[in-house]
Amino acid sequence: MPTQTERPVRVWLLLMGLTLCSVALFEGGWLGPAASIVIVLIAAWKSRLVILHFMEARHAPGHWRVLYELWNFAAAATLLIGYLVSLRVT
Amino acid sequence: MSRSISASQTPIDRPSPGSEGLWTFVFIDMMIFLLIFLTFMGERIGHLALYTQAQGQLNELFGLANTLVLLTSSWLVVEAVQATRRGQPQRVSQLLGGALLLGAVFSVNKGIEYAHKFEVGITPASNPFFSFYFFITFAHFLHVLAGMVCIFHFRRRARLGVGSAEYLTGLENVGLFWHYVDVLWIFIFPMLYLMGRL
């Protein structure tokens, strides 16, 4: 089990890696809707990591963890559904 | 309520981080930004060609740099909160100084990005996409500035000692707000700079 002091650095490294993956998709020319969808899913994953590990929502009263996680889901769903609907319009 | 905790305590023993009021304040702000995201995505559907063309005028490297800067700054604040729990004022001061420096880097980067836009004649009045771009990024930037003021204040106070429960709760609140600023940018970056350009 990771100690208290090493856990944040591991989360930070994962966040940096996920960010670079997002931009690699863009710069690497992986075209198409799939790339946009993956980028939003990566953003939702990163946001959840920050909420749980940096904000320490894991240790906050349960209702705050639920509400913050629901917000994260709603934000990702807003981007994804908005994007997918725009594909149908074109 | 007075509290005294250490890094060796298990999560079950540890009181919840921050104060109820700050969790509420941040959540209200989150809901406002969610409505802004919803409005942007709705408008984007209605004017897709214009939004896609305008989005192509953004340089994603500015967004990427600011994402990496904010994530790193957030991590330093987490470490500062943990150093407070261990009672290490000098370490807290150093870590908050680093977070503050990165906040300044974000601000300079944002200033350069805005200057480039104005140089080529792009303003909030240019088209609806850039209205959203300037509104969302400037509202976020104001959050960065507010967070920096709070970090600066707690860095100064750290020199006087970090042993009080009041200082710890205050710094946890600052951290909560600073990480929220990070969470916002995590969504703003793909929404404005990346999504749909692919």
Image (spheres, helix red, strand yellow):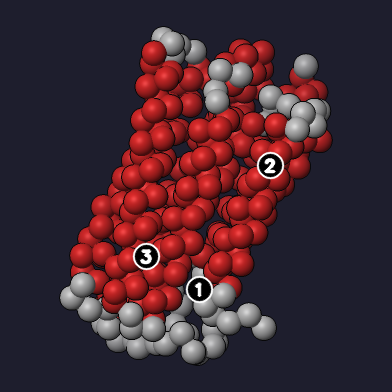
Q: Position of residue B178 (x, y in %)?
A: 41, 56
The image quarter in which residue B81 lies: bottom left
The chain under label 1 reads: A
**Residue A31 appears in the picture as rendered:** yes
Q: Are marks 2 and 3 in contact (CB under 8 Å)?
A: no
Query: Residue placed farthest to the left in the image?
Result: B160
Q: Position of residue B61 (x, y in %)?
A: 56, 32
A66 and B90: which is toward the camera: B90
What's the mark number on residue A22? 2
Identify the residue at image location x=39%, y=81%: B85
For marks 2 and 3, give the one nearer the viewer. Answer: 3
B195 in relation to A16, above or below: above
Label 3 neighbourhood size at 10 Å, few (<14), some (14-19), many (20+)? many
Are discs 2 and 1 both within one chain? yes
Identify the residue at image location x=46%, y=58%: B74
Sequence order check: which comes first, mark 2 or mark 1? 2
- What kind of element bears circle 3? helix
Q: Amino acid at mark 3?
A: Leu
Q: To which residue does mark 3 refer?
A: B95
B15 and A54: which is toward the camera: A54
- Tally of marks: 3
- What kind of element bears circle 2? helix
